[in-house]
Amino acid sequence: MTEALLQVSCISKRFGGLKALSDVSLTVNAGEIVGLIGPNGAGKTTLFSTLVGLHKPDSGTITLDGRELVGLKPHKIAAAGMIKTFQNVALFLDSSVLDNVLTGGLLRHSVEDARDLARRCLERVGISAISDKLARDLSFPERARVEVARALCTQPRVLLLDEAMAALNHVEMDEFMRLLRQLREEGLTLIVVEHHMRAIMSLCERLVVLNFGQLIATGTPAQVSHDPAVVQAYLGRSAA
Ligand SMILES: Nc1ncnc2c1ncn2[C@@H]1O[C@H](COP(=O)(O)OP(=O)(O)OP(=O)(O)O)[C@@H](O)[C@H]1O
């Protein structure tokens, strides 16, 4: 039996005259991996940023396990259990991997406890061996894992991944997706924005599609890929 963990109801967000999100509603169940897709400018990053409190919606509600999140600052939303990784991985380049990851733990813990937690998170994502390496010396796959480890260090229930696989080749992507499935097995709920369709189709059991700020389809990857509105949204943009 699945359980609704995240409930987004009628979220709208304007930037001046541009309606970046129009009445977007969606439900994410505990333990799901949901893919959020849509053409460039569809509103995916805006929705993620709104979910974690970086933007305040003009209207609508967002509840996590029944708790209203709209109006809370990002660190409060992180403490409530939802965190996002960033599109352009933003690490402290002159700090070690361990120090980067432990910053996530400072939300709830002392430095010492955050360091212990960070070590466990590094182990969880399979990069304990590079804990002393400087962030500036990391490969792209290592960076992607460090970013996930740092997010895990906030002890989230819902992890939002914004194009975490953008710089990875196919083999690296497959390894990274194995990690995401493993995290889901461990109880994490994931929402993934990704432009690599092959990855998103194999990783996610459900997709949500945005176009011009509106939710135009939701369903299994097979359902969504045959949805005329989705086909039109992608073909229309590429034709343009
Ligand atoms: N801070 C902002 N100020 C003004 N307009 C913005 C701002 N952020 C996003 N937009 C606009 O809102 C719309 C949605 O942008 P958003 O970045 O959310 O789309 P996206 O689906 O994530 O696109 P991409 O796939 O290219 O990353 C776009 O038209 C964008 O130009």
Image (cartoon, rainbow, N blue to C red):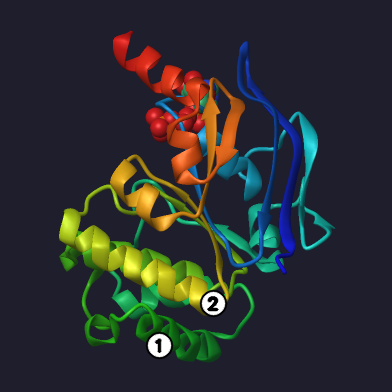
The quarter of the picture where residue 126 lies is bottom left
Up-down relation of residue 190 to residue 220 (above or below) = below
The structure residue drawn at horizontal position 40% and vertical position 26%, both measured from the top left corner, is 40
- Compared across the picture, whether 192 is left or right of 177 comes to right
Q: How far apart are marks 1 and 2 (CA)?
A: 11 Å
The residue carrying mark 2 is: 105
113 or 170: which is nearer to us? 170
Which quarter shows the N terminus? bottom right
The earlier-in-sequence mark between 1 and 2 is 2
Instruction: Say if residue 196 shows up in the picture.
Output: no
Query: Which mark identifies residue 165?
Result: none
Q: Is mark 1 within 8 Å of ligand 1?
A: no
Residue 198 coordinates in the image, percent (x, y): 29, 46
143 or 1: which is nearer to us? 1
Specify few, some or many for label 1: CA neighbours under 10 Å numbering under 14, 14-19, or 20 or more: many
The quarter of the picture where residue 6 lies is bottom right
The structure residue drawn at horizontal position 21% and vertical position 77%, both measured from the top left corner, is 133
At label 2, which amino acid type do we have?
A: Gly
The structure residue drawn at horizontal position 63% and vertical position 41%, both measured from the top left corner, is 50
Residue 208 coordinates in the image, percent (x, y): 55, 40
The residue sitting at the top extreme is 240
Instruction: Say if residue 134 shows up in the picture.
Output: yes
At label 1, which amino acid type do we have?
A: Arg
Residue 85 coordinates in the image, percent (x, y): 45, 56
Residue 15 coordinates in the image, percent (x, y): 61, 21
Q: Which secondary structure lies at badge 1?
A: helix
The residue carrying mark 1 is: 119
Specify few, some or many for label 2: CA neighbours under 10 Å numbering under 14, 14-19, or 20 or more: many
- Compared across the picture, whether 45 is left or right of 144 comes to right
Which quarter shows the C terminus? top left
The structure residue drawn at horizontal position 38% and vertical position 44%, both measured from the top left corner, is 194
